[in-house]
Amino acid sequence: MKNFTKLSALTVFLAMSAHASHVIDLGSQGKTGRFCPGDTLSIDTNGQYIERMLISAEGIRNDGFIKVYADGELVHNIGIPGYDPDYTFRVRRNVKNISMKFERTCALIRDGKIFSPSPAPSNYRRYERERVNNDNWGAEFLEISRSLSNDLQFEADFNSNLWPRVLLPMKKISLLQNASELVRDERSLITAHRSLKIAKIVIDNEDLIERLLSNDHFDYLVSDLLRIKEDILERYDVKEKKVNEKIIELEEELGL
């Protein structure tokens, strides 16, 4: 498989957004235009899961800021210069209301979109970071591998490629990680090693990610895969390009 780092995170998420089943368009809701310091732009999102936002904004005369809140919690601080860039950022939570507060200068909101991934099937359990105990992503990753195995079993290359090269390694590391949950705490080097190997499987499978993105029915799976990867990297403070190096370091320390 190609190295996942060749495909930027922004490209992946914008591709996901393009296929999203539900998009809140600020323009169609009359939420664009000129806003000045002290103004608040409010968007009701009805408690749905919000993956990402894209805002096109231009500072008028001076630089300024737009603070974006999800149910009152700051999720992004947009710095707006005097030109018209696009700002894309993650929200990743169920949200009832998005609010944007303007500071220091007036701003022109030219466009804005709020993206939600395609809905998952009723028999699929969406990934939630809150369910991960003791840094054990095994059960969550196993759910994704189970779903992928079921959904892709009739693909022409399932037996020759998808199962042996992607899905079987996913299942194996998921079961190993899950088995260690009751006997190892979050400081365990083995737990860290297995968690990073989960992240590496996602990183190493750019081809599968792109393949799933070509069908908007799999947006929820791509979203969960990328969220697990990013949560693991954040937990262990490891850059994506350093994952393999860190895994080798842990294996040397563990004598594997």
Image (spheres, rainbow, N blue to C red):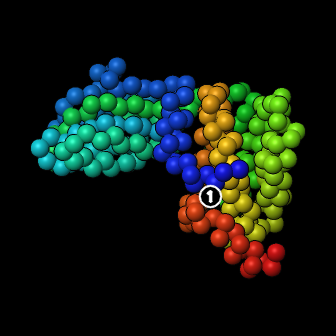
Determine which residue is flagged by label 1: 232
Residue 220 lies in quadrant: top right
| Residue at the farthest left position | 61
Image coordinates for residue 250, horizontal then vertical, percent: 71, 74
Q: Around disc 1, counting alpha carbons within 10 Å, would you say few (fewer than 14), some (14 to 19), or many (20 or more)?
A: many
| Residue at the farthest right position | 159
Residue 124 lies in quadrant: top right
Residue at 70 percent of width and 69 percent of height: 247
Q: Is residue 112 visible?
A: yes
At numbered mark 1, what does the secondary structure look like: helix, strand or loop? helix
User: In the rendered structure, which amino acid carries the disc numbered 1?
Assistant: Ile
In the displayed structure, does residue 197 sit left or right of residue 37? Answer: right
Residue 43 lies in quadrant: top left
Front residue (pair 162, 178) = 162
Front residue (pair 239, 33) = 239
Above or below, 40 against 175 in this view is: above
Residue at 39 percent of width and 37 percent of height: 54
Residue at 22 percent of width and 48 percent of height: 81
Front residue (pair 4, 235) = 4
Q: Is residue 175 visible?
A: no
